[in-house]
Amino acid sequence: MFRLLRQRALKWQLLLVIVEFALLAGCVYAAVLLRYWGDLDTQLAFGRALHWRALLVAGVLVFSMAALGLYQVHLRAGLLGRLSRQGVAFLLGWVTLTVLYYVIPATYLGRGVLGIALVLEYLVVALWRMSFLGFVDADLFKRRVVMLGAGERAAEVVRKMRRKTDQRGFKILGYVPIGDDPVAVPATSLLHPAKCLYQWTQRMGVDEIVVGPDDRRGTLPVDALLECKQRGIAVTELAEFFEREAGKIKMDLTNPSWLVFSDGFNISPVRRTVKRAFDVAMAALVLLVGWPFMLLTALAIRLESGWNAPILYRQERVGENGKSFPVIKFRSMRTDAECDGVARWATKNDDRVTRVGRFIRKTRLDELPQLWNVLCGDMSIIGPRPERPQFVDDFNARIRYYSLRHCVKPGLTGWAQLRYPYGSSFEDAEEKLKFDLFYVKNHNFVFDLAILVQTVEVVLFGRGAR
């Protein structure tokens, strides 16, 4: 948790959540005043119960907005897209509150008050977000960064983090050439500091120096960097900078020693116990809520494919520590999809997928039987998606550090599923590994909860399914 709080982006995310929670709760009080304007007796009748009801409404709506990805740092959506997502989030919140009112009548707020509150909250949050995101994107409030190095390694920042959403927490002032490295960044972005590095950074207002030369042997101004660090300027290695700002580990920027000596990749007995308890509790809860959908899915498969066709299918996947296990899913493809025994990726508009299969893949209903794998201990709720042994053998031979993703149990959903679409090639697997390793290195209970909440967005919008 401490490592996560050091991220600048998470700090403004927490501020955004706290302020919006307060605004949403305040709108409930305003809705009562507007609904019963001039009727002081009715207003007083709400009494202290209004306090926790307002907190309940605010909590449900914040959860709904988080589920729709509205608190993601790198959400790429225009104003209309954000307003649409917010509308869907409020609709989801309204449905949740309505169900809650029927289940727990004591939470009932009143249709008129709830309707007025939702309209007020939508408008207030929309206006607040427009002003707040403008505030966050202003260069004045970004971390001022200087890149020490101007070669191919440093140019990765130019190539991979060029969008405004990628640079929401920082502003790169420029690149300082080091040694004989060939310059690979635009000449207009080059900087040439004075002899005293610390005094120059003071004049430039530098908050952080990111070290990323192609060859650092005998070329780094170690004494000058140490002075800057001692005087309060952060000094960060390029791989760590990418990990923090992009939420992934750049494999071409890392080396074995960085992986060994960096923070993370540690799974304590307490963490294992907490994660297992979380897995069992969530699997039981989802089964309790989802069994009618599972029953309908099984019936639909049976009606489409006939009474002799199987409803479920088992497929060998690679789990924790490289051990194989049979994953269980609802059958979404024809029974002869791999009659020759050769493993194949699912492709876009794959003709092997049945009509029911296309729907359950989009809605992720085909994944629900894997809850049994979770209860058995083969899988976790959150973790890297398990791959087939044939693919894993190939990836282990061709992709550096691929085996590290098997340090934890595979999951129903994961960080890579949120940040990258469905993978169907070697290149996709290589890119998804960057996010999987970020999860393996940084996973904790709070991170798992955040991934679980944002998975709702993936299910609702069918993102990444094939």
Image (spheres, rainbow, N blue to C red):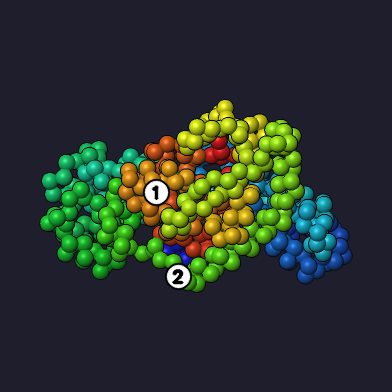
Instruction: Pinpoint residue 144: horizontal percent, then vertical percent.
Output: 33, 53
Residue 275: x percent and y percent? Answer: 54, 65
Q: Quadrant of residue 186?
A: top left
Of residue 428 and residue 197, the one placed in the foreground of this image is: 428
Residue that badge 1 annotates: 434
Query: In the image, 164: left or right of 445?
Result: left
Horizontally, residue 362 falls left or right of residue 94, namely left
The residue shown at (49%, 36%) is: 341
Which mark is first along the chain, 2 or 1? Answer: 2
Identify the residue shown where x is 47% and y is 72%. 269
Residue depicted at 14% across the width and 55% down the height: 217
| Mark pair 1, 2: CA separation | 23 Å
Between circles 1 and 2, the one closer to the viewer is 2
Q: Are marks 1 and 2 in contact (CB under 8 Å)?
A: no
The quadrant in which the C terminus is found is top right
Residue 265 percent location from the top left of the image = 39, 62
Q: Residues within 10 Å of mark 2 (few under 14, many from 20)?
A: few
**Outermost residue, bottom side:** 270
The amino acid sitting under disc 2 is Ser
Occupied quadrant, residue 380: bottom right
Image position of 185 with respect to 201: above or below: above
Residue 352 vs 231, above or below: the answer is above
Q: Amino acid at mark 1?
A: Lys
Q: Circle 2 is placed at which residue position?
A: 268
Secondary structure category for the residue under label 1: helix
Percent x, y of residue 350: 55, 29
Is disc 2 placed on a helix, strand or loop? loop
